[in-house]
Image (cartoon, rainbow, N blue to C red):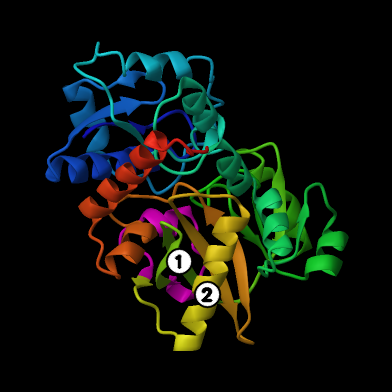
Amino acid sequence: MRVAVILGGKSAERDVSLASGAQVLRALRERGHEAIAVDMERGKMRKDDEDRLLGAEIGVFPPADELIVSTRRFPARFTDLTDGGSGGSIDVFFLAVHGGAGEDGTLQAALETAGVPFTGSGFRGSAFAFDKDAAKRLFRAADVPTPDWLMAPCSPEEAGDRLGWPVIVKPNKQGSTVGLSLAKGSPDLEPAITAALRYDDEAMVEAFVPGRELTVGVLEDRALAVGEIVCPDGGIFDYATKYRTGAAHEKFPASLSAAETRTIRDLALRAHRACKLRDYSRVDFRLDNAGRWWCLEVNSLPGLTATSLFPQSAAAVGIGFPELCERICRLAIGRHRSPDARF
């Protein structure tokens, strides 16, 4: 296969995307495929740029501001890559992008318009999953429990009465826990909302669920291994904890009973389907102290870095990372060739 790995762009998750793309490029090349790196903003990477950018580590903090990406060039740029001018036609575009226009359905819509095969969900599912408010409404319609929430603006009195303290405050349309914080009481709410709005035009205020944090990968409409994330000193799994090596302990498979495992895997599939996702995703949960499950969110383009949870979920059921990347590519190619293909 000849694969164009789309990465980078201009979002608060650019560093994460570059790290994911580097892993995917190495994995596909290891399997004998020709993989080229394409920055979503700048086009095909030169070898020196690839070596410089893809070897960098993810910073402890995300960029200060999200940059809005123009979409007007997407169809022309990616169509140009398929015309032979870059050394041959592209069999599939592998989306290793995170955040912003790369994950909210904008890029997916452009690629669908261009008529080229690409990995992951289409523009509708991507948009549903990326908008946390919309996704939680779909969860409830599918009988997937999710913590109660409010959309800002809301007063401390309303948040306290409706949700109780503490609350989680986060951008409504963002990933990698960018802009997320824990507001422990009324004085913390407004600063937390302000921090979230640095990365999005909407902020969500969500009831905090104390308990265990768990995650499930989904591949080809099958739930993979359940993993548990244990943060130091009982803290939250924020951006710094997520991307600092050794900051959190991740265990696959999680220590759960057979019944608990069946329940969370079933809920993960229901959440994945409710958002109209395809091929693969990762669904995050909390298990509270009363034994109740709460779905936090679903990720249509989960991280594929060296420390990411989705590859660990696949590895725990015997799917190594190079095989995982290849399978994701073949799913996209097969769908594109099918006369009944839908985006």
Q: Position of residue 330 (x, y in %)?
A: 30, 44
Q: Which residue is found at the position 69% from the left and 68% from the top?
A: 143
| In this picture, residue 335 sits left or right of residue 83 | right
| In this picture, residue 45 sits left or right of residue 103 | left
The boundaries of the magenta stretch are 228-249
Question: Is there a contact, CB below 8 Å, between mark 2 and mark 1?
Answer: yes
Q: Position of residue 91 (x, y in %)?
A: 28, 30
Membership of 48 in magenta stretch: no
Residue at label 2? 264
What element does badge 1 sit on? strand
Relative depth, front residue between 246 and 226: 226
Height in image: 317 above or below 9? Answer: below
Height in image: 205 above or below 269? Answer: above
Disc 1 packing (10 Å; few <14; some 14–19; many ≥20): many
Residue at label 1? 216
Q: Position of residue 137 (x, y in %)?
A: 73, 56
Q: Which mark is residue 7?
A: none
* Residue projecting furthest to the front: 339
Q: Position of residue 291 (x, y in %)?
A: 60, 85
Height in image: 210 above or below 171? Answer: below
Q: Quadrant of residue 86?
A: top left
Q: Which residue is found at the position 78% from the left and 62% from the top?
A: 186
Spatial separation of the CA atoms under disc 2 and disc 1:
8 Å
Q: Amino acid at mark 2?
A: Ile
